[in-house]
Amino acid sequence: MFRLQGSKVLAVDMTGDAVKAKNGSMVAYDGQMAFKKMSGGGEGVRGMVTRRLTGEQMTVMEVKGHGTCWFADRASEINLVNLQGDKLYVESSNLLATDAGLRTGTSFTGLRGASQGNGLFTTTVEGHGQAAIMSDGPAVLLRVSSQYPLVVDPGAYIAHQGNVRQSFQSGVTFRTFMGEGGGEAFQIRFEGDGLVYVQPSERNTIAGDA
């Protein structure tokens, strides 16, 4: 159902089913389609409360019909993730689309709200199906194992999946080693067994360069 057309356009072929996508990300479609605006950040009352706490303005649309829709967002690279009953944790700004077989929600990830604009919660995607996530430049998948924990710059982090524990280390970033950067600084540490998606470009954080 999901396929890439180049590295920056997602094509979704539908035969009466539905897809949820970032509002405003559709660039073209053929066939017969119906569109419905949805609230993002999670489904149900818990999602509404979470959005109020985090201040996230994640707007989602549902597209349903017969034909093909094409999605893109600011020329970002698009990465397809196949989920087989597992859960993907992804920054809301990096989530482009999910198919109808997946559920979205929110997860508390720790006390990083003072440092990063995305707040205390990360968007979760779980079930059986495909998701499309975006990155500024081609995403890199890094393995986390019990012998080798992984430390990631928060500005480069996109998503993770697997049996992974996430924690935050304050006081230093990679740029601090070189005498650059300023303000409150931290890193994200991953332990366990899974995958972490990072991008080769750093988003801005409230704390400044991370």
Image: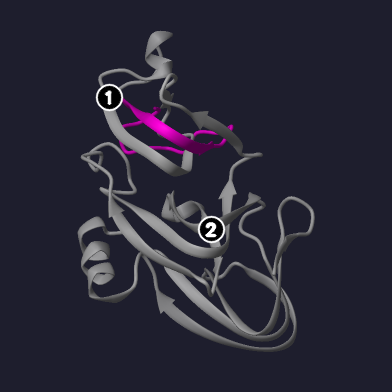
Depth order, front residue of 69/145:
145
Total numbered labels: 2
Is residue 191 found inside the magenta-colored segment of the image?
yes
Q: Which residue is mark 1?
A: 169
The amino acid on which the numbered mark 1 sits, given as a three-letter code, is Gln
Specify few, some or many for label 1: CA neighbours under 10 Å numbering under 14, 14-19, or 20 or more: few
Name the residue type under label 2. Gln
Q: In the visual, does 137 lie left or right of 100?
A: right
- What separation in Å lies between label 2 and label 1 (alpha carbons)? 31 Å
Can you see residue 204? yes
In front of the other: label 2 or label 1? 2
In the rendered structure, which disc, 2 or 1, sits on the residue that comes first in sequence? Answer: 2
Q: Position of residue 15 (x, y in %)?
A: 70, 84
Give how far across and how far down residue 132 sits, in percent: 59, 58
User: Which residue is drawn at the image coordinates 53% and 58% (left, top)?
Assistant: 84
> Magenta part of the protein: which range?
185-210
Q: Is residue 150 above or below residue 69?
A: above
Q: Quadrant of residue 9?
A: bottom right
Q: Position of residue 138 (x, y in %)?
A: 66, 39
Can you identify the residue that label 2 sits on? 84
Mark 2 secondary-structure assignment:
strand
The local crowd at label 2, few if under 14, some if 14 to 19, many if 20 or more residues have their Cα within 10 Å, is few
The quadrant in which the N terminus is found is bottom right
Q: Is residue 32 magenta?
A: no
